[in-house]
């Protein structure tokens, strides 16, 4: 089976940087996704990592270490609209689908 | 290019009635996933389907719930004899392929059982 852990909640200040961690245990690793979900809305895709290292996309970056079973999502220059839940999802070659963590609720304060 | 479509967006059912939730995947996508989300909780996987086949239904309750994805038409999630505990948001997602493909989510159906 798979096990995915993320912090339940985080709080940060507008303009600051925040790092949301995700650890996972899986066999047949086939990539890790990050999604953003605003309250009452559907999740939307943010990033995908399958190789070790950092992927940068504007204010958002995602890092992966396969040997450590670890990823993080880095959000820079935080804006109020970044307040949302951030979901880590791991793709497994055996399952053929992604398994989602319970999400981290980020609150950005002025 | 239309995204994933779900209908209805809101559905109210009395206990004991049936609920039918529909999902049309993005054009060109043949992989469909259903998730349930309770308020303040994460997404819980229910079922993964390809056209005319159920690939993984490990997250589906053993009774009252069923899903299909026919050759023609939308995917259907069916809940028979609904109970109050079935009240939740049900999201459908589709992807281009199996495994390492991002999923595109529909807007969800909010089911309320009274």
Image (cartoon, grey):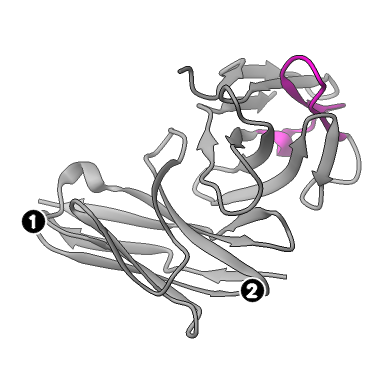
Q: Secondary structure at mark 1?
A: loop
Q: Which mark is residue A15?
A: 1
Per the rendering, the mark at residue B47 is none
- In this rendering, is residue B29 above or below A35? above
Q: Position of residue A57 (x, y in %)?
A: 24, 53
Q: Callout 1: residue from which chain?
A: A
Question: Furthest-right residue in view?
Answer: B63
Answer left or right for A101 relative to A94: left
- Determine if marks 1 and 2 fall on one subunit: yes
- At 18% from the left and 53% from the top, the residue drawn is A59
- Residue underneath mark 2: A26
**Crowding near the residue tagged with mark 2, few <14, some 14–19, many ≥20 C-alpha atoms within 10 Å:** some
Q: Secondary structure at mark 2?
A: loop
Quadrant the N terminus of chain B occupies: top left
User: Which residue lies at the image location 40% right of the left edge and 74% below the top edge?
Assistant: A52
Q: Which residues are magenta?
A: B65-87
B71 versus B97 height, above or below: above
Please tell me in which quadrant of the rendered image residue A43 appears.
top left
Q: Nearer the viewer, residue A86 or A66?
A: A66
Q: Are marks 1 and 2 in contact (CB under 8 Å)?
A: no
Give the image location of residue A31, x and y in percent: 52, 63
Q: Is residue B15 left or right of residue A62?
A: right
Between residue A69 and residue A10, name the one nearer to us. A69
* Rendered residue at 70%/23% (across/down): B114
Where B78 falls versus A46 (above or below)? above
Q: Nearer the viewer, residue B9 or A22?
A: A22
Q: Which of the two residues, A25 or A108, is positioned nearer the viewer here?
A: A25
Residue drawn where x is 15% and y is 47% of the image? A79
Residue B86 shown in magenta: yes
Corner quadrant of residue A76: bottom left
């Amino acid at each position: 089976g798979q096990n995915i852990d993320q912090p339940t909640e985080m709080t940060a200040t507008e303009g600051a940087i925040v790092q949301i961690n995700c650890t996972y245990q899986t066999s047949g690793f086939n990539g890790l996704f990050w999604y953003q979900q605003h309250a009452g809305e559907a999740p939307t895709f943010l990033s995908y990592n399958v190789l070790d290292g950092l992927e940068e996309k504007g204010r958002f970056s995602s890092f992966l270490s396969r040997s450590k079973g670890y990823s993080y999502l880095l959000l820079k220059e935080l804006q109020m609209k970044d307040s949302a839940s951030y979901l880590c999802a791991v793709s497994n070659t055996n399952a053929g689908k992604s398994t989602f963590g319970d999400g981290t609720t980020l609150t950005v304060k002025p | 290019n239309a995204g994933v479509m779900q209908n209805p967006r809101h559905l109210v059912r009395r206990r004991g009635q049936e609920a039918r939730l529909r999902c049309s995947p993005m054009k060109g996508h043949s992989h469909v996933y259903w998730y349930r989300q309770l308020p303040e909780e994460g997404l819980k996987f229910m079922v993964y389907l390809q056209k005319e086949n159920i690939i993984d239904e490990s997250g589906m309750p053993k009774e009252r719930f069923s899903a299909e994805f026919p050759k023609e038409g939308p995917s259907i999630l069916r809940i028979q004899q609904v109970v109050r505990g079935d009240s939740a948001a049900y999201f459908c997602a589709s992807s281009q392929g199996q495994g390492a493909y991002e999923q595109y989510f529909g807007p969800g159906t909010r089911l309320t059982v009274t």
